[in-house]
Amino acid sequence: MRLKPFLGLALVLLFSCAANRVNAQTEPAATEKRTPFAVGVGFSGYNPDYGHGHLLGGTVWMDYYPSRVPSFLQGIGVEIEGRDLNYGRSSTQPTNLREDVVQGGVIYSWRHFRKIRPYGKFSEGYGNTDYSAVSGGRLGYFHDSRTIFSGGGGFEYRAFQYVSVRVDYEYQSWPNFFKHPATQTHPARPAGRLNPQGFTVGAVYHFSRPRFH
């Protein structure tokens, strides 16, 4: 499973939506349909927790904020996220190191500021990684996949009427990480678990103007 086609599709969708919104500015405000969806793309820099260094790539977001919820749930939503980290490897890392994630979960936004909207989130999903290790004096290439969990947060800054800049932090947990076939030991520290973490900066397009206060 690779996310590169999805990153391209999300980017096309983001610009298409922006163009359509510009063309629709002449519609009366009273007839505007409120669609509580948002899509976004971003650039990610992560510590992959395999060796020392960093790994770069792209991220896509799709958010849904239901409008009809009890008052104490105002700001809660659902997020689907995909990330492909496959570039900018440090020299100390395997040359084929790659981490892909597709996940979904709950996002909660605080809407009490004029242009800044902080949020927190928790997700569960599917991750896979490629890496290499020396086994029996020979270099071997391996692949591993599993269910992962993540938590994080960040904020959005409304740059235009429907477009916001997002700064996102995420901490992931990959349990029971792959055992080396020769030594039956885990390459991760602490043993048996990867904890990638990092930041993403990107743009989010809201199909209706987000409520920031």
Image: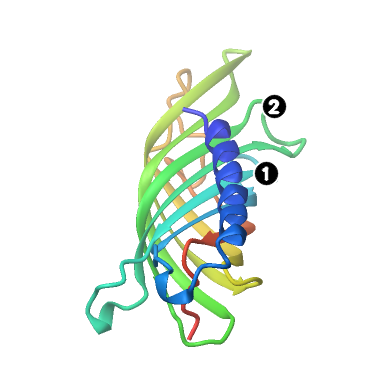
> What is the x, y in percent for residue 6?
52, 36
Query: What residue do we see at 37% from left, 35% from top?
Result: 146
The correct choice, above or below, for 106 with respect to 95 in the image is below
The correct choice, above or below, for 117 with respect to 35 in the image is below
For the question of whether residue 49 can be seen, the reply is: no
Q: Which mark is first along the chain, 2 or 1?
A: 1
Q: Nearer the viewer, residue 62 or 107?
A: 62
Q: Quadrant of residue 132?
A: top right
Provide the residue designation for mark 1.
56
Query: What residue do we see at 55% from left, 61% from top?
Result: 24
- The mark total stands at 2
For the question of whether residue 122 can be seen, the reply is: yes
Report, in whole angstroms, how far the alpha carbon at label 1 lies from the one at label 2. Answer: 13 Å
Query: What residue do we see at 47% from left, 41% from top?
Result: 101
> What is the x, y in percent for residue 213?
48, 86
Q: Amino acid at mark 1?
A: Leu
Q: Secondary structure at mark 2?
A: loop
Residue density around tag 1, few if under 14, some if 14–19, many if 20 or more, within 10 Å? many
Provide the residue designation for mark 2.
95
Task: Tell which residue pokes out farthest to the left in this image.
Answer: 70
- 24 left or right, relative to 78: right
Residue density around tag 2, few if under 14, some if 14–19, many if 20 or more, within 10 Å? some
Chosen colour scheme: rainbow
